[in-house]
Amino acid sequence: MIATSTFGLESIVAEEIKALGYSDLKVENGKVTFTADEKAICRANLWLRTADRIRLKVGEFKAATFDQLFEQTKALPWPDLLPEDAEFPVDGKSVHSTLFSISDCQAIVKKAVVESMKKRYRTGWFKENGPLYRIEVSLLKDKATLTIDTSGPGLHKRGYRSGGSEAPLRETLAAALVIIARWKPDITLIDPFCGSGTIPIEAALMGQNIAPGMEREFASEAWPTIPRECWHEARRETHERADYNRELDISGTDIDARAINTARKNAARAGVEQAIHFQERSLSELSSKKKYGKIICNPPYGERLSELKEVEKLYKEMGKLFKKLDTWSFYVLTAHENFESLFGKKASKRRKLYHGNIKVHYYQYYGPRPPRR
Ligand SMILES: C[S@@+](CC[C@H](N)C(=O)[O-])C[C@H]1O[C@@H](n2cnc3c(N)ncnc32)[C@H](O)[C@@H]1O
């Protein structure tokens, strides 16, 4: 199987796959490959918080000519995976490869799969009115990897977001920020720029061990090739492991009342409204009596020139206010290149990530360790 990942998050995705109990992992740019049984298709889709999607790897081979691509694709066991009525569109991508025409590669793979299916099903025409098996041919330096998407809509689509917010963070990235910050359910968490609430919601889901995919469906749920019992069992596991009564100390605040309204609605849809305290509040009102907490946030970046001055002022204010929380740790995601100097402190660690196509940095400021109890 292949769990695809945003650039920069591969090791976090790998960590999650290991925690699910799978070993034998290979981590590469943008993906983590692992070996597991069909039940893992259900579990990986339901549980992985930071992966983009889960693909089933059907085959991998060298292909520098269309003939090689056709013959080797045809030789793969498609009829074992696809029922006669399967709908099987073919997506493609090609990077640094002799076969650079993506549309030609797609057409050839489609033809090869049809040829392989013809033999088994003894028909020359496939209606394709059944479950969706979205195939992808991905060429990298003349190596073709053929996969089938098991997820359907990307895994960031948890099903709790209503839209309407200005610049929401991708759910998978928000989950990654919380994991990288090593937040645990007994630690106080504040997001002072919470917007639509993605960071607090993802943390609450984690804190109560709620599977992020619990409320949605996946393309492979309609596949006759995966026994119903596999999905039943995996869904049962998500219910058994959820700890809805786990007390959490998570707050999300934002200067924009509409954003707070959206955040509350999203949290309710995600089933974690009881676990998060949302409040309309400007950064300048930030304070806490708690110790050893964590601030995890993505403040405005100031993409528009007109906003830049405001944002820079805000970063300076963050520096002053955060300093008062002298036992806390801070985690800030921003695309602004000069964040550290405006904030007034060099980060303990920074990590390059991507928010969509925007290059961003995750600045991590470690506070003191809490005393041992
Ligand atoms: C990049 S967005 C955060 C998006 C959020 N992570 C989400 O997933 O929806 C930045 C947020 O900072 C808020 N904001 C801007 N200035 C602020 C201030 N001075 N105090 C508090 N919030 C502020 C904006 O209203 C906006 O919602």
Image (cartoon, rainbow, N blue to C red):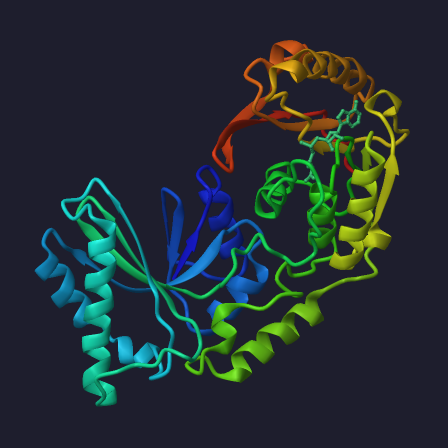
Quadrant observed for ligand 1 in the rendered image: top right
**The image quarter in which residue 92 lies:** bottom left
Instruction: Please tell me which residue is depicted at 75% across the width and 36% down the height of the picture.
Output: 194
Instruction: Please tell me which residue is depicted at 83% across the width and 30% down the height of the picture.
Output: 291
Q: Quick check: 59 left or right of 364?
A: left
Q: Looking at this view, is 70 or 288 the one in front?
A: 70
Q: Looking at this view, is 9 or 25 the one in front?
A: 9
Count of all numbered marks drawn on residues in the image: 0
Location of the N terminus by quadrant is bottom left
Residue 251 appears anywhere in the view: no
Q: Looking at this view, is 121 or 209 the one in front?
A: 121
For residue 337, above or below residue 225: above
What is the x, y in percent for residue 280?
87, 34
What is the x, y in percent for residue 282?
85, 25
For residue 144, above or below residue 173: below
Residue 337 appears anywhere in the view: yes
